[in-house]
C-alpha cells in the first residue's frame, strides 16, 4: 500500500470521528426518540476497552505468551456476567454523588477528600500516559508496515495533533457537566463497530489461508501455539493478569467515563453488560485463528503486527485497509476518551486550586472561572497527549504492546480496592486512603513504570541490590509484572488496613487555600455565578439579597452547581472554605454541607412508594425543567419506548415526543412545547383535558413545587368522558323530544280552538233556525187559545208553556255553548229576585202539576248583580232536571237562605 493511500485511510477514520460527532451534536442527539439506537451506541461505545493493544497486541501475546492474552478478555467478562448487583450499586452511587470522574467518585465517598482525589488522579495519569503512548506507537508501526517506509515518527506526530483537536472540540465542549458529549458516544460506538468488523474480516481470511496452507507450515504453527497453551504454562502470572484485568472494565478512566458518566440512567451499564461481554468474547475468539495463521505462514514477522502482515502477504488490499482502519480506530477512540477523562481529572483535582488562588486576588466576573476551567481542560488534553507522544518516542520499539498495557492495568489496580469500598458505603477513612494510595503509587512507579525507560546501565548497577526495581530487597524470583503488582498492591492494602485500624479520621472539612469568605446568600450566589454565569445563578438564587442567611438548601445547591464545573470534591472543599472563612463554625458548615444520607434516601423511597400507589400518572421536573421522578402509571399512560424516561431528560423532549404522536393534532408542536415550558417556569397551575389520537381522554393537572420545579398528574378519564358524552347526548335527545311534544300539543290546542270557534259559529248561525219552529208553534197555540174555550183552552195554554220552557232550555244550551267557546260575554245588572223567581215558578207550574208535584215559593226579597239571562238558563236547567226525576220534593227560594 502506498504512503498516500495509508495516509488517506488514516485521515478518513479521523474525519469519520469528526463527521459523526458533529452531526449528532447539531441534532441534539441522533434518533433522540429511539432508545434502542442510543442504547446500542452506548453499548458499542463501551468497546473502547479494546484498544490497539487488544486489536494488534493480543495476537502477539497469544503467540509469545499463550495463556497471558486470555485474562485480559476473560476477567472483565466474568465481572460483567456474575456481578450485576455490584455494577448497579456502583452506578447508583456514582449518580448519587453526581461524579464525573473516577477520582471524583472515590474522593466523594472518602469524605470529599481533595488529597484522595489528587492521588487517584496522579496514579491514573501516570498509568494512562504510557497506555496512550502505546496507541501512538501502534498507529506509527501500522502505517510503517503497510507502506514499507520509516514514517512512524511523522505518523505519530500527525495523529497526536488530529486526535488532540478532536478531543478538545468534542470532549471539552463546555465548562459545565464536565465532559458529557452525545456526539462522542456515537462516534466511539461507530469505531467499536468498525473494530469488530475489521477483526472478523481478518479472522475469516486467516481461516481461508489455513485451509490452503501447506501441512508442514500448519504443523509448525500448531506446535508453537500448543506449546504456549500447555496446562503447565498456567502460572501465577496468569492469575495476576486476571486479578488486575477484572475491574479495568470500569476503573480505567475511559471506561468509567463511558460506562457511568455517559449513562443516561443507573440501569444502562447493567443493561449493556451482556452486549459488552459478547463483544469481548468475540474479540478473544477471533485472535486465535489469526495467531495460528501468522505463526504458520509468517516467519520472522513481529507477532504484534500479524493483523497487517497476513492480508499484506496475500495481496488482499481491502482486507489490509480494513485491518489498518480497525487498528487506527481502536487507538484513536482510546486516545480521545482517555485524554478527555484525564484532562477533567487533572483540571479539577490538580490545577483548580492554583487557578482559584490566582483569582482570589480580584473579583471574578460572571462565568469567568467556568471559562478558565474550560481553557485549562483543553490545555490539559494537549499536555497529556504531548506527554504520551514523548513517552512513545522514548519507549523501546522492542517492548511488546501487551507489556505496556499490563503496566497501565497494574496502576489502575492501586485504587481498585478503594473503588469497591466506595461503592458500598460513603464516609470511608480518608487518611487510610491517602496513605495506601501514596505507598502503592510510589512502589508501582519504581517497580513497573520506571524500569522500561531507565537506561540499561542503571538497571545493571541496581541489579542484585535491595533497591533493584525488579527484585526489591532481593526477595523472590518472579516476573517483573508479578513482582511489581505483589509489592505495590500488597503494600497498598496493608497500609490501608493498618491506618484504618487506628480509627484516625481525616479533617471534617478539607480547605482550598485562602478562599474569599462568604457571609450571606448574595455572596454565595456571586461565588456560584463566577463558575456558571450570572443568568443561571440568578435563576437558581432568586431571593439572594444582602444580609439573607445561608440555609442548607442554598449551600447544597451552590455545591451542586459548582461541582458541574470542578467536580464534587473540589466544589465541596471550595464552598466549605468560603463558609468557614465567613466566621461560620465548623459544625454549622458541616450541617449545611453534610450528606443528605438516610433522610434523603428515606424521602425518595417514601415518595416513590407513594407515587406507585396513586392511580394517576405523576411526573416531577426540577427547576431546570428536567425530569427527576415519575411512576409506572405515567409510563403506561403515554406508552414511552423502553428506557426513554430517565432522570435528567428535558421535559421538553417528552412533550415533543407526545406531540409527534398526534397529541396536538395538526398544530405546531414547537409552539405547544414553548407554551408548556413557559407555563411551568412561571409556576402557574393548570388543568385541562386532551383527547389523544388513540381515543383516550387524559386530564392533566399541574402545579408548582416549593423551591422550584413542577409536578403534574395525568388521569385517564376516558370512561368518565364517555358517560359524560352519553349523558349529554341523552339530555339533548330529551330536550328535543320535549320540544317536539310541546310543539305537537300546541298544534292540537290550536286545532281544538279552531274547532271550538267553528262550533260557536255554527251554533250562532243555527240558533235562529232552531228557535224559529218554536216561535211558530207558540203562535199556533196562541191562536188556538183564542178559538177554544174550556178544557181545550187549558190544554192550549199548557202547550204554550211547554213550548216556552223548551225554548228557554234551548236558549240556555246555546248560551252555555257560546260561553264555553268564549262567544258569550256576561252582562251583569241588578235584578229583583221576587218577580224574577215568581215568573220562573209560574213557567214551570204546569210541568210540576202534570208530574203531581207542588212548586212552592217563599217570601223573596233582595237584589242580585248578575246576568239575568244566564241566571235564568241555569235555574231553568235545575228545575227541569228536578221535574224530570219524578221525585216528590218542594222548592223553596229565599233571598240569602239558599235553595233546597
Image (spheres, helix red, strand yellow):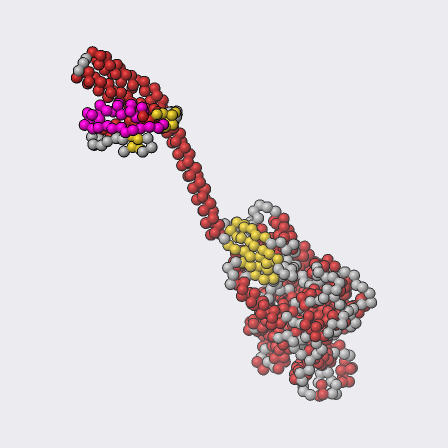
Which image quadrant is residue 841 in?
top left
- Expressed as whole percent of the image width and height from the top left, the position of residue 788 reads 19, 13
Whether residue 534 appears in magenta in the rendering, the answer is no
Which residue is at 76% across, 70% downward?
Answer: 582
Kindly indicate the quadrant of the structure image that contains residue 478. bottom right
What x and y, as percent, mark residue 82?
55, 73
Say which quarter of the image contains residue 653. Answer: bottom right
Q: Residue at x 79, y 61 (%)?
A: 365
Extreme-top residue of the structure: 787
| Position of residue 452 measured from the top left corner of the image (x, y, whole percent) | 73, 77
Which region shows up in magenta? 835-863
Q: Count of labels shown?
A: 0
Q: Is residue 521 visible?
A: no
Residue visible at 67% across and 58% down in the picture: 21
Q: Nearer the viewer, residue 779 or 129?
A: 779
Locate the C terminus by quadrant: top left
Amino acid at each position: 500500500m502506498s504512503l498516500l493511500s495509508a495516509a488517506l485511510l488514516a485521515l478518513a477514520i479521523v474525519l469519520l470521528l469528526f463527521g459523526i460527532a458533529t452531526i449528532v451534536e447539531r441534532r441534539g442527539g441522533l434518533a433522540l426518540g429511539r432508545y434502542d439506537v442510543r442504547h446500542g451506541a452506548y453499548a458499542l461505545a463501551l468497546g473502547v476497552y479494546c484498544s490497539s493493544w487488544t486489536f494488534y497486541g493480543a495476537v502477539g501475546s497469544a503467540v509469545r505468551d499463550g495463556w497471558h492474552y486470555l485474562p485480559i478478555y476473560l476477567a472483565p467478562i466474568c465481572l460483567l456476567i456474575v456481578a450485576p448487583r455490584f455494577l448497579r450499586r456502583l452506578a447508583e452511587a456514582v449518580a448519587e454523588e453526581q461524579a464525573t470522574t473516577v477520582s471524583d467518585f472515590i474522593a466523594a465517598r472518602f469524605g470529599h477528600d481533595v488529597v484522595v482525589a489528587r492521588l487517584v488522579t496522579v496514579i491514573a495519569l501516570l498509568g494512562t500516559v504510557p497506555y496512550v503512548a502505546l496507541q501512538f506507537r501502534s498507529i506509527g508501526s501500522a502505517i510503517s508496515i503497510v507502506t514499507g517506509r520509516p514514517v512512524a515518527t511523522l505518523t505519530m506526530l500527525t495523529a497526536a495533533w488530529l486526535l488532540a483537536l478532536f478531543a478538545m472540540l468534542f470532549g471539552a465542549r463546555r465548562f459545565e457537566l464536565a465532559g458529557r458529549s452525545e456526539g462522542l458516544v456515537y462516534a466511539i460506538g461507530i469505531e467499536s463497530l468498525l473494530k469488530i468488523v475489521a477483526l472478523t474480516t481478518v479472522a475469516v481470511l486467516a481461516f481461508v489461508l489455513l485451509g490452503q496452507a501447506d501441512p508442514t507450515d500448519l504443523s509448525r504453527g500448531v506446535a508453537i501455539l500448543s506449546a504456549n497453551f500447555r496446562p503447565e504454562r498456567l502460572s501465577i502470572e496468569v492469575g495476576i493478569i486476571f486479578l488486575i484485568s477484572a475491574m479495568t472494565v470500569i476503573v480505567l478512566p475511559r471506561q468509567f467515563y463511558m460506562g457511568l458518566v455517559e449513562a443516561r440512567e443507573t440501569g444502562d451499564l447493567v443493561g449493556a453488560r451482556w452486549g459488552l461481554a459478547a463483544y469481548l468474547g468475540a474479540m478473544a475468539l477471533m485472535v486465535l485463528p489469526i495467531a495460528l495463521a501468522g505463526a504458520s505462514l509468517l516467519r520472522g514477522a513481529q507477532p504484534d503486527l500479524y493483523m497487517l502482515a497476513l492480508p499484506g502477504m496475500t495481496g488482499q488490499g481491502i482486507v489490509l485497509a480494513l485491518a489498518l482502519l480497525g487498528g487506527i480506530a481502536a487507538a484513536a477512540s482510546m486516545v480521545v476518551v482517555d485524554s478527555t477523562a484525564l484532562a477533567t481529572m487533572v483540571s479539577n483535582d490538580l490545577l483548580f486550586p492554583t487557578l482559584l488562588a490566582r483569582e482570589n486576588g480580584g473579583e471574578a466576573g460572571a462565568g469567568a472561572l467556568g471559562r478558565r476551567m474550560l481553557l485549562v481542560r483543553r490545555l490539559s488534553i494537549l499536555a497529556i497527549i504531548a506527554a504520551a507522544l514523548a513517552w512513545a518516542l522514548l519507549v523501546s520499539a522492542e517492548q511488546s504492546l501487551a507489556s505496556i498495557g499490563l503496566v497501565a492495568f497494574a496502576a489502575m489496580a492501586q485504587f481498585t480496592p478503594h473503588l469497591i469500598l466506595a461503592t458500598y458505603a460513603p464516609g470511608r477513612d480518608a487518611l487510610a486512603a491517602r496513605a495506601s494510595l501514596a505507598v502503592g503509587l510510589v512502589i508501582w512507579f519504581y517497580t513497573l513504570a520506571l524500569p522500561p525507560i531507565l537506561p540499561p546501565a542503571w538497571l545493571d548497577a541496581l541489579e542484585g541490590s535491595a533497591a533493584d526495581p525488579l527484585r526489591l530487597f532481593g526477595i523472590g524470583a518472579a516476573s517483573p509484572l508479578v513482582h511489581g503488582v505483589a509489592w505495590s498492591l500488597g503494600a497498598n492494602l496493608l497500609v490501608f488496613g493498618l491506618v484504618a485500624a487506628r480509627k484516625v479520621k481525616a479533617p471534617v472539612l478539607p480547605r482550598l487555600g485562602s478562599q474569599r469568605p462568604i457571609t450571606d446568600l448574595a455572596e454565595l450566589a456571586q461565588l456560584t455565578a463566577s463558575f456558571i454565569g450570572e443568568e443561571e445563578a440568578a435563576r437558581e438564587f432568586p431571593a439572594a439579597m444582602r444580609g439573607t442567611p445561608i440555609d442548607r438548601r442554598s449551600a447544597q445547591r451552590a455545591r451542586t452547581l459548582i461541582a458541574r464545573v470542578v467536580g464534587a470534591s473540589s466544589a465541596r472543599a471550595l464552598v466549605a472554605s468560603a463558609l468557614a472563612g465567613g466566621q461560620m463554625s465548623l459544625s454549622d458548615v458541616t450541617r449545611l454541607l453534610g450528606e443528605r444520607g438516610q433522610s434523603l434516601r428515606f424521602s425518595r423511597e417514601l415518595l416513590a412508594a407513594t407515587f406507585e400507589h396513586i392511580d394517576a400518572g405523576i411526573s416531577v421536573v426540577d427547576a431546570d425543567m428536567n425530569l427527576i421522578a415519575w411512576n409506572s402509571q405515567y409510563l403506561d399512560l403515554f406508552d414511552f419506548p423502553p428506557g426513554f424516561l430517565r432522570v435528567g431528560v428535558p421535559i421538553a423532549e417528552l412533550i415533543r415526543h407526545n406531540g409527534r404522536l398526534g397529541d396536538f393534532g395538526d398544530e405546531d408542536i414547537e409552539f405547544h412545547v414553548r407554551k408548556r415550558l413557559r407555563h411551568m417556569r412561571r409556576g402557574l397551575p393548570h388543568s385541562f383535558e386532551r383527547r389523544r389520537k388513540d381515543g383516550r381522554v387524559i386530564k392533566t393537572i399541574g402545579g408548582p413545587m416549593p423551591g422550584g420545579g413542577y409536578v403534574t398528574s395525568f388521569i385517564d378519564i376516558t370512561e368518565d368522558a364517555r358517560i359524560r358524552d352519553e349523558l349529554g347526548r341523552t339530555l339533548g335527545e330529551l330536550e328535543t323530544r320535549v320540544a317536539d311534544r310541546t310543539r305537537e300539543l300546541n298544534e292540537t290546542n290550536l286545532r281544538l280552538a279552531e274547532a271550538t270557534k267553528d262550533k260557536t259559529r255554527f251554533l250562532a248561525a243555527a240558533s235562529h233556525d232552531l228557535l224559529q219552529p218554536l216561535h211558530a208553534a207558540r203562535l199556533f197555540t196562541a191562536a188556538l187559545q183564542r178559538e177554544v174555550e174550556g178544557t181545550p183552552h187549558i190544554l192550549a195554554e199548557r202547550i204554550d208553556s211547554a213550548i216556552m220552557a223548551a225554548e228557554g232550555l234551548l236558549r240556555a244550551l246555546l248560551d252555555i255553548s257560546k260561553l264555553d267557546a268564549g262567544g258569550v260575554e256576561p252582562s251583569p245588572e241588578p235584578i229583583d229576585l221576587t218577580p224574577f223567581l215568581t215568573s220562573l215558578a209560574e213557567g214551570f207550574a204546569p210541568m210540576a202539576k202534570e208530574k203531581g208535584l207542588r212548586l212552592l215559593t217563599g217570601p223573596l226579597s233582595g237584589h242580585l248583580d248578575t246576568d239575568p239571562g244566564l241566571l235564568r238558563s241555569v235555574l231553568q236547567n235545575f228545575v227541569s232536571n228536578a221535574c224530570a226525576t219524578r221525585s216528590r220534593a218542594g222548592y223553596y227560594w229565599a233571598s240569602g237562605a239558599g235553595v233546597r
